[in-house]
Image: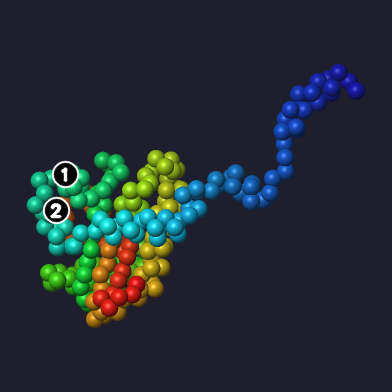
Amino acid sequence: MSRQLWLALMLLAPVLGGCRIVSRQELADLKNPPNPHMANIDQTWQQKIVPQIADDARPAGELMRALSAADDFDSACIQYGWRAQPENPCVFAVRVSGTVEKVDTASRSGKVFIKDSRGETAVVQLGPTLRGTALRDGYKGVSYQDFNDQALFGDFSRAINERAGAMMKTFNPQPGETVTIDGVFSVWDIPARLPEITPAKAVRAQGGV
């Protein structure tokens, strides 16, 4: 063996010694690291996100009056809503109770229209495709800093919206029914009227979900 070949083998030994065969799944994970926040997404949705929104939700009329009377948007957000960072929109949890006027399923971004006790009509996303990130942004358990990756943060939002859409599909509201919806909306300023709501919990007057 030549001196040059011996030296080359000595240099390569530590590298070769540290190599191992990886499975296809391990290789896929190395290329696209798994999102740890997705591991228990069903549990997070059912045991954390939905209860938080239900606990924080204020009746629509009460919330809108409080927002209208607020001195400014920042103070209103601090008192009645949530945002993880000042540059984010503020997310408010709201409860709408009333009679289903209409169900629009013409597109995958369906909507249900509910007339509340004020005589006002609230618009709630029905899905199956729910738009926006209000459910994610209103959840106090995580923020972007927990991901540090926009794609993973987006995956988390889509997974939450999918569960809300599945919940509304099972709920299947019908015109004439009396229902209560707990959900969220996000805004950059005090709204003049109730914005479109992304649902988290839905209950019929006679019970059942």
Label 1: how many Cα within 10 Å (few below 14, some 14–19, many 20+): few
On screen, residue 117 above or below 30: below
Q: Residue at x 34, y 51 (%)?
A: 139
Q: Residue at x 26, y 48 (%)?
A: 82
Total marks shown come to: 2
Give the image quarter of residue 184: bottom left
Residue located beneath label 1 in the image: 75
Q: Earlier in the sequence, mark 1 or mark 2?
A: 2
- The residue at the point 41 percent across, 63 percent down is 163
State the image coordinates of residue 151 (x, y, percent, origin top left).
45, 48
Q: Nearer the viewer, residue 154 or 205?
A: 205
> Mark 1 falls on what kind of element?
helix
**Considering the numbered disc 2 on the image, is that residue within a helix, a strand or a loop?**
helix
**What residue is drawn where x is 10% and y is 46%?**
71
Closer-to-camera residue (42/16): 42
Residue that mark 2 sits on: 67
Query: What amino acid is labelled 2 in the image?
Result: Leu
Where is the N terminus found, in terms of image quarters?
top right
Rendering coords of residue 98 (x, y %): 20, 73
